[in-house]
Image (cartoon, rainbow, N blue to C red):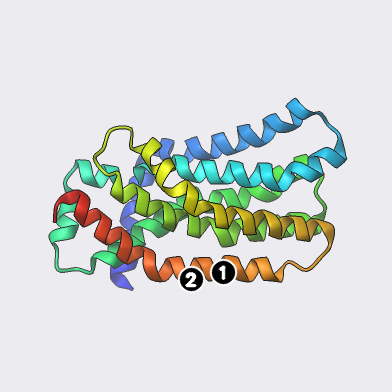
Amino acid sequence: MKLLIAAMLRDLKAHVRRPGDVLNPLVFFIIVISLFPLGIGPGQATLQLIAPGVIWVAALLATMMAMENMFRSDFEDGSLEQMALSPQSMPLLVLGKIVAHWLVSGLPLVLLTPVVSLTYYLSGEAILVMTLSVLLATPSLSMIGSVGAALTLGLPRGGLLIAILVLPLYVPVLIFATSMVLSGTEGTDYTGQMYWLMAILLMALALVPLTTTASLRVSLGR
């Protein structure tokens, strides 16, 4: 736990020194969600209908924007290679970096979701379900995206390659999250979708640190 917390705090301090890494995805998220009501019109029924898809696609793309920077700075200054050579557990170091990434890119989205949901005239229960879906699914997005970030490390236009690699893996998360919100909006039971999102999160937690570590070693030639 000490190693995990140390890796997480180190990355959090690095993100604080680069505020653009934190602010750019959040500004993108707010702009995308704000433009749809302006473009489509203020019709309440229409906005309530498209809200789950719009908010979730914006959250997914905002998370992906920050993915390229997860390992790049450590790769450029040689820290990542030192981590790979150290006797410490590399999967734990990777997990700490993923948690730090979620804290600066996913958690702000969770906090912003109730506010932006008001733009789409969602009810209190629908806003609660929307926020819960973002809370359950964004950690999985960060974990899955870390594999793509590790595989494209050091390649030009890595952001585009990350999108090509991880978007197919994001589809199940997007389907269950939007379905959960639709069920909550209609007043029907959404526990099935919630359990699926939790299962995806637990499976990613078990597999992704090892997979990302192997991908990093391939990119580093270790």
Viewed as shown, does residue 144 lie left or right of 29?
Answer: left
Q: Nearer the viewer, residue 9 or 191?
A: 191
Residue annotated with mark 2: 202
Residue sitting at 68 percent across and 29 percent down?
A: 35
Choose top left, top right, bottom left or bottom right for residue 162.
top left
Where residue 7 sits: x, y (%)? 30, 60
Q: Nearer the viewer, residue 131 or 157?
A: 157
Count neighbours of disc 1 (C-alpha within 10 A) and say few if under 14, some if 14 to 19, many if 20 or more: some
The reply to whether callout 2 and callout 1 are in contact (CB within 8 Å) is: yes
Where residue 90 sits: x, y (%)? 24, 64
Residue annotated with mark 1: 198
Mark 2: amino acid = Leu
Residue sitting at 75 percent across and 55 percent down?
A: 182
Residue sitting at 83 percent across and 31 percent down?
A: 42
Q: Residue furthest front?
A: 168
Viewed as shown, does residue 134 lie left or right of 188?
Answer: left
